[in-house]
Image (cartoon, rainbow, N blue to C red):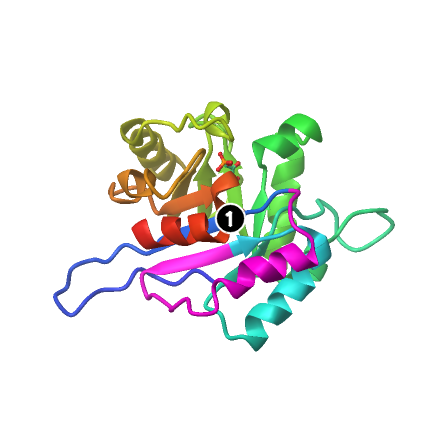
Amino acid sequence: MIRPRGISTHSIIMKRIFIVANWKSHKNKQEATDWLKTFLDFKKSEDKEVIVCPSFTILPYLQQWIGSHRLPLSVGAQDVSPFAEGAFTGEVNARQVKEFADYVIIGHSERRTYFSETDEMVTKKVEMARQANLTPIFCVQGGQTPVPPGVEMVAYEPVSAIGTGNPDSPENAEGVIRAIKEKTGASYVLYGGSVTPENINSFTSLPSIDGVLVGGGSLDPKTFAGIIENA
Ligand code: 13P
């Protein structure tokens, strides 16, 4: 869960960095296990929180594996129903997700594009998530995307940067993210889109950027470990 930014003994404000792996529609149980095994020696860092978001099918398995091996990783889901419990075939509601995760990605551009999710629908998802005490990681495609009330964590993901190897410039991302914070009051705003071990620090070293949402770069555990290391 979100903790306040720490203050060091020298009273320098330490920025807490969130590094979120969005596996999208990748990985079965065996592939997830192989990935997790490479993090067995991963040490907890006070200033970096790592969140892994797998498919629903392996969410309970991941939570259990991480718990029993005491890995310093948090778990998130990639989506949640806009409805409460009820007759909504195929949907997974927020109370069900909360059994296995603390975070949930909402409003990803892929869901808006391929599954016709509207601003109204993603607003309902945020309401459901918050009622269930799940922290939404709310994706916006630019500074104009509406952010529902009460969202604490936003991810700025310009569509042109997703999966293209063509990230936003750190300077532009910093400007957009600063503006999102001023407009919405969100405490944490992440950048997402073609993040790599090589470019991560150019984003996370900037004052307004609180972390990254990583797609392709999270699938290979060694690459993802490099992203965490360099953040
Ligand atoms: P890539 O890191 O593959 O560009 O994807 C970003 C993303 O969509 C994360 O949610």
Is ligand 1 closer than 8 angstroms to the Cβ of mark 1? Answer: no
* Residue depicted at x 32% and y 66%: 46
Residue 39 is a magenta residue: yes
* Residue depicted at x 68% and y 64%: 60
Q: Left or right: 176 with respect to 35?
A: left
Does residue 156 sit above or below 219 in this rendering? above
Q: Left or right: 204 with respect to 225?
A: left
Rendered location of residue 11, percent (x, y): 14, 64
Residue 222 is a magenta residue: no
Rendered location of residue 50, percent (x, y): 44, 57
Q: How many residues crowd around disc 1 within 10 Å: few (fewer than 14), some, or many (20 or more)?
A: few
Considering the numbered disc 1 on the image, is that residue within a helix, a strand or a loop? Answer: loop
Does residue 60 sit above or below 127 in this rendering? below
Q: Is residue 72 visible?
A: yes
Q: Left or right: 219 with respect to 175?
A: right
* Residue depicted at x 64% and y 26%: 113
* Residue depicted at x 52% and y 39%: 216
Residue extent of the magenta highlight:
25-51
Q: Nearer the viewer, residue 207 or 34?
A: 34
Q: Is residue 147 visible?
A: no
Q: Amino acid at mark 1?
A: Asp
Rendered location of residue 140, percent (x, y): 49, 33
Q: Residue furthest left?
A: 10
Rendered location of residue 210, percent (x, y): 34, 47
Q: Label 1 belongs to which residue?
A: 220
Q: Nearer the viewer, residue 128 or 69?
A: 69
